[in-house]
Amino acid sequence: MKYRLLTPGEWPRLENLIPPELIPSPETSVIAIAEDDDGRILGVLPLQLQWHMEPLFLFSPDVSFSRLKEVLDNQLRDFPGSCYYTFVPNQQLAEIVGSAGMEFQPALVFRWPPSGGEVN
């Protein structure tokens, strides 16, 4: 088994393996692959810069969160395969974000390196 980074020119090899909407943008990602001796890809693990939006500051009740979000949505059109996340600290913000069309993700979040840690 050979483990290596997939070169940008090889990304089309993923098209028959992974749904296109799950292939991250090559401009913001690298992909580790595992290949057998015949060059078949048997494992794929992307490392991607991940857009996230926070913190939110509203200084007037007239400001629309949805309109602010729409401005950011338009930026992703140039990065196929990209998405973004937000981390909210309370139920009130969760409701605002959900009402703007964002989808709740039931996920555990892990961090590397651990807080206060260094990469060795």
Image (spheres, grey):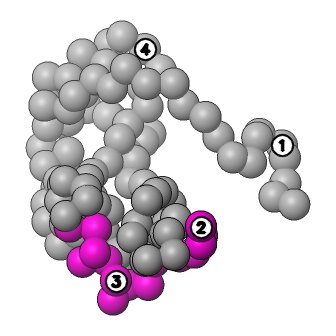
Point out the image quarter for the C terminus.
bottom right
Is residue 12 shown in magenta? yes
| Residue behind mark 1 | 116
Between tags 3 and 4, which lies in front? 3
Q: Position of residue 2 (x, y in %)?
A: 59, 72
How far, Cα to Cα, is label 2 from label 3?
18 Å
**Closer-to-camera residue (13/100):** 13
- The first of marks 1 and 3 along the sequence is 3
| Residue behind mark 2 | 1
Against 59, is 108 above or below? Answer: above
Q: Position of residue 9 (x, y in %)?
A: 33, 89
Between tags 1 and 4, which lies in front? 1
How far, Cα to Cα, is label 3 from label 4?
43 Å
| Residue behind mark 4 | 90
Q: In the rendered structure, which amino acid carries the disc numbered 1?
A: Gly
Residue at 32% across, 48% down: 84
How far, Cα to Cα, is label 2 from label 1?
35 Å
Cβ atoms under marks 2 and 1 closer than 8 Å? no
Snapshot quadrant of residue 79: bottom left
The residue furthest front is: 38
Judged from the image, the secondary structure of the residue bearing numbered disc 4 is loop
Q: In the rendered structure, which amino acid carries the disc numbered 3?
A: Glu
| Residue behind mark 3 | 10
Q: In the rendered structure, which amino acid carries the disc numbered 2?
A: Met
Res 9 visible? yes
Residue at 43% across, 77% down: 39
Magenta segment range? Answer: 1-15
**Closer-to-camera residue (110/52):** 110
